[in-house]
Image (tube, helix red, strand yellow):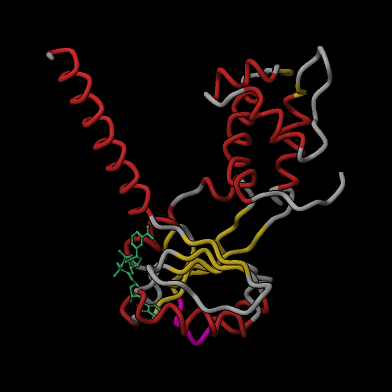
Amino acid sequence: MDEKEISQAVISRLPRYYRYLGELKFEGVERISSQELSELMKVTASQIRQDFNNFGGFGQQGYGYNVEYLYQEIGKILGLDKKHNLIIIGAGNLGQALANYMNFERRGFIIRGLFDCNSRLHGTIIRDIEVQPMEKIKDFVKENDIDIAVLTIPKASAVDVAEQLVQYGIRAIWNFAHVDLNVPEGIQVENVHLSDSLMRLSYNINRYDSELAKKNSAENA
Ligand code: NAI
């Protein structure tokens, strides 16, 4: 497949395609038309065709898409054909919840270590992973081929900790701290803010309510 610049909008839709195709594969579906996929995913068929055309199409006229092939190819584009070793920094509520979630491993994201500055947490075991002091990160990253760090610490220290992690060889940060990190070019950062998602939900509730109110007042006029 040719490497070409793909828009972030397309990339952001790929995990959803991947999830649906994974479910279809699990159900034993071998092929699917863009129309069927469109109905299932509630995305227009033309959007699906346009998205897949970024990667050379995948489909065959009159046949539709081969589910297994498409699943594998999108997985490759997302880099899911490779394993990633992760460490979590901050073994509080969120860090422990992420460490306890096993599904990341099915996607090739293996949580190898948990680190925290609070000595009371050191030695705590979460799903066979021991919480270690921060001083051990440097050697641990080298010895365990760690490429991703998950930041679940307060924002006050996140920027400094991220800078240190980069010096230790971390290539990517999954950032839950509510602050923008200052990392050199080439270091990938994905910010996750659950509250943004909640705010979008709140916006949609408001929008729905005000449209309903407008409709009701038009009907009663
Ligand atoms: P928590 O207080 O339960 O855990 C934070 C942990 O980080 C503690 O164990 C603490 O000892 C450790 N820590 C603090 N500074 C550290 C440092 N410099 N180095 C290493 N460890 C350090 O907090 P919780 O609920 O787990 O949240 C963690 C952070 O994630 C908070 O800043 C919170 O605002 C944020 N958060 C973000 C969400 C998102 O959607 N982005 C959702 C929930 C929380």
At x 43%, y 77%, the residue is 158
Q: Is residue 202 left or right of residue 142?
A: left
At x 72%, y 49%, the residue is 6
Q: Nearer the viewer, residue 100 or 200?
A: 200
Quadrant where the C terminus sits is top left
Pinpoint residue 127: horizontal percent, then vertical percent. Answer: 46, 57
Q: Quadrant of ligand 1?
A: bottom left
Q: Is residue 156 left or right of residue 80?
A: left
Above or below — where is 117 with respect to 126?
below
Above or below — where is 94 with respect to 56?
below
Dominant secondary structure (helix, strand or loop) of the stretch shown in magenta: helix
Q: Is residue 194 left or right of residue 23?
A: left
Does the segment drawn in magenta span residue 133? yes
At x 59%, y 40%, the residue is 13
| Extreme residue in the right direction | 2
Q: Nearer the viewer, residue 164 or 27?
A: 164
Q: Nearer the viewer, residue 198 or 208?
A: 208
In this picture, which residue range is highlighted in magenta?
A: 132-136
Above or below — where is 37 with respect to 156?
above
